[in-house]
Amino acid sequence: MTVPALSSDVVETATLCAEIARVQIRPHFRKPIGIENKEDASPVTLADRAAEQAMRDIISQNHPDHGILGEEYGQSAGQGDWTWVLDPIDGTRAFITGRPSFTTLIALLYCGRPVLSLIDQPLTGERWLGRAGAPTCFEGASFPGQVGTRACGSLAEAELSCTSPDMLIPPFDGRFASLKQKVRRTSWGGDAYGYGLLALGQIDLIAECTMKPWDWAALVPIIEGAGGFISDWQGNPLTLDSDGTVLACGSLSLQEEAVSALRASF
């Protein structure tokens, strides 16, 4: 599939969305805020909803023919091949417990393929920008970092990360356990922030499951633009019909080893 060249206005829209999300989110951090549980038992706050609505307003004004898919307000159909995918606060549990590891995720899909993405941390000012076929860009004045996945020779030397063991429901728990046995160390927590760290060479691989499109769409161009690889646990490209598994690795050889390990429980 040939992807049209991205215009500067869509990059500007993504940036504006990140800025307005910061405005909506930052005043509520470590402050009393109402928390509701959604049908899947995940928490949601006023900050989540206000940030998504503000981003939707910007997109609708700048690109009225584009579709929008957001975690809080669902799908609004567009008239063409372009769809924005939004997660206003990825890591709401971190946000409501005062941990600055949550992020805002913004992605633009062309015919279902992520071609532009942004990970933004509203408090630290860290921001990753990815575009299909281009190197990932990173801004982080307070916490500088060099974009690029690090060389890791094998799973035995690898740092593995996953947001929470609670997401590893059967049959994914057994498959993850097979991978965990082969790595040097496993750390927990981080949500999408962990993928930003992988793009900076701080983590070698991440394996997660039960992921929705708004959880993974913004990760793809950023990981690939940093020299990494991202797929499902079978090694297939992520699509809107994927099974919810996500595997991000710093190198192709590491991905091949990890896919093999994740199949070991079958």
Image (spheres, rainbow, N blue to C red):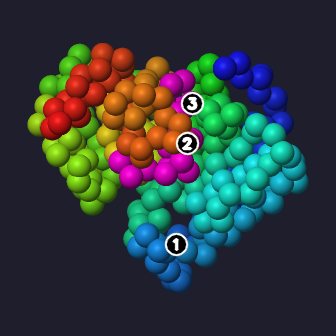
Q: Amino acid at mark 3?
A: Pro
Q: Mark 2 highlights which residue?
A: 240
Among the two numbered marks 1 and 2 on one chain, the one whose residue lies closer to the N terminus:
1
Relative depth, front residue between 62 and 122 = 62
Q: Is residue 68 above or below residue 82?
A: below
For the question of whether residue 122 can be seen, the reply is no
- Measured as percent of width and height from the top left, residue 48 is found at 59, 67
Q: Tell how many labels.
A: 3
- Measured as percent of width and height from the top left, residue 103 is found at 52, 53
Q: Alpha-carbon neighbours of circle 2 within 10 Å: few (<14), some, or many (≥20)?
A: few
Name the residue rendered at 47%, 41% in the picture. Answer: 242
Q: Mark 1 highlights which residue?
A: 44
**What range of the chain is rendered magenta?**
209-225
- Distance, label 2 to label 3, CA atoms, is 15 Å
- Residue 214 forms part of the magenta stretch: yes
Among the two numbered marks 1 and 3 on one chain, the one whose residue lies closer to the N terminus:
1
Q: Amino acid at mark 1?
A: Val
Q: Mark 3 highlights which residue?
A: 221
Q: Is residue 92 above or below residue 11?
A: below
The quadrant the N terminus occupies is: top right
Q: Alpha-carbon neighbours of circle 3 within 10 Å: few (<14), some, or many (≥20)?
A: many
Q: Say left or right for 37 vs 58.
A: left
Among the two numbered marks 2 and 3 on one chain, the one whose residue lies closer to the N terminus:
3
Name the residue rendered at 34%, 45% in the picture. Answer: 208
Relative depth, front residue between 16 and 248 = 248
Label 1: state its secondary structure: strand
Name the residue rendered at 28%, 28% in the picture. Answer: 259
- Measured as percent of width and height from the top left, residue 121 is found at 54, 51
Residue found at the far left of this picture = 181
Relative depth, front residue between 250 and 64 = 64
Q: Say left or right for 76 vs 114.
A: right
